[in-house]
Image (tube, rainbow, N blue to C red):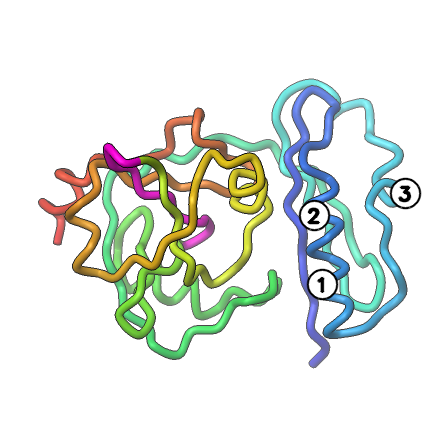
Amino acid sequence: MKETFSEAIKLKDGKLYNLPYHQARIERTQAKFSGERIILSDVLSFIPRHVQRGLFKCRVVYGSQVEKIEFIPYFYRQIKTISIVIDNDIDYCFKYTDRTRLDELLKQSACDDIIIVKQGLITDGFSSNLVFESKEGLFTPDTCLLQGTKRQYLLDTKKIKEKRIVLDDINAYSHIHFINAMIDLEDGVCMDMARLRSLY
């Protein structure tokens, strides 16, 4: 079965966000798996009128070429329960459309979200990169499963820093933030670590 991938791009009031970062990830993916060159600015040059107001996830599915473009209304998730899960073999270094293992881990946790630990190291959440907050600043694990576009943007703008974070380290942080192409730090999708500690 051929591999397929996706880019989830923030579309707010007709504006596409962080397009150069999504373009760079597509190019990294195609350098590994080949295919005709996809230029997002061309592919998404026309935005349908009915999605030009409000917040949408623009999802581009591609393999050797673009297979589907869809616009999905987006609402921020409420994360009330979270579980730490261990999977020492998980691999999600490219944004595959096949998320079977991630779906399994979330289902097994019976929680709203998960913190995935691989070989004793903190990696990612179910559909997000993680940012840990302490009085020293904001830190994202240098062992993420997927190099997210928002994560890279925040690193490039020096709003967060990379750091090796092992499981035992998380008690040193006050909050954990969940970020992805649709969710920024200011959107408040986070959890107080005291709350997390009470759950595991």
Comparing marks 3 and 2, which lies closer to the viewer?
Answer: 2
> What x and y, as percent, mark residue 129?
44, 49
Which callout, 3 or 1, points at the residue further toward the start of the chain? Answer: 1
Q: Nearer the viewer, residue 198 or 119?
A: 119
Q: Which residues are magenta?
A: 126-136
Amino acid type of disc 2?
Answer: His
Give the CA separation, mark 3 to mark 2.
13 Å
Quadrant housing residue 175: top left
How many numbered marks have been drawn onto this rendered protein structure?
A: 3
Mark 1 or 2, nearer chain start: 2
Circles 1 and 2 in contact, beta carbons < 8 Å: no
Q: Which residue is mark 3?
A: 42
The three-letter code of the residue at mark 1 reads Arg
Horizontally, residue 38 falls left or right of residue 100, namely: right
Q: Which residue is pictured at 85% across the width and 55% down the height?
A: 38
Q: Height in image: 44 above or below 34?
A: above
Give the residue at mark 1: 28
Comes first in the chain, label 3 or label 2? 2
Distance CA(mark 3)–CA(mark 1): 18 Å
Whole-percent x, y for residue 80 in the image: 25, 38
Whether the magenta-drawn stretch holds residue 87 is answered as no
Q: Residue at x 90, y 42 (%)?
A: 42
Identify the residue shown where x is 25% and y is 61%: 166
Determine which residue is flagged by label 2.
Answer: 22
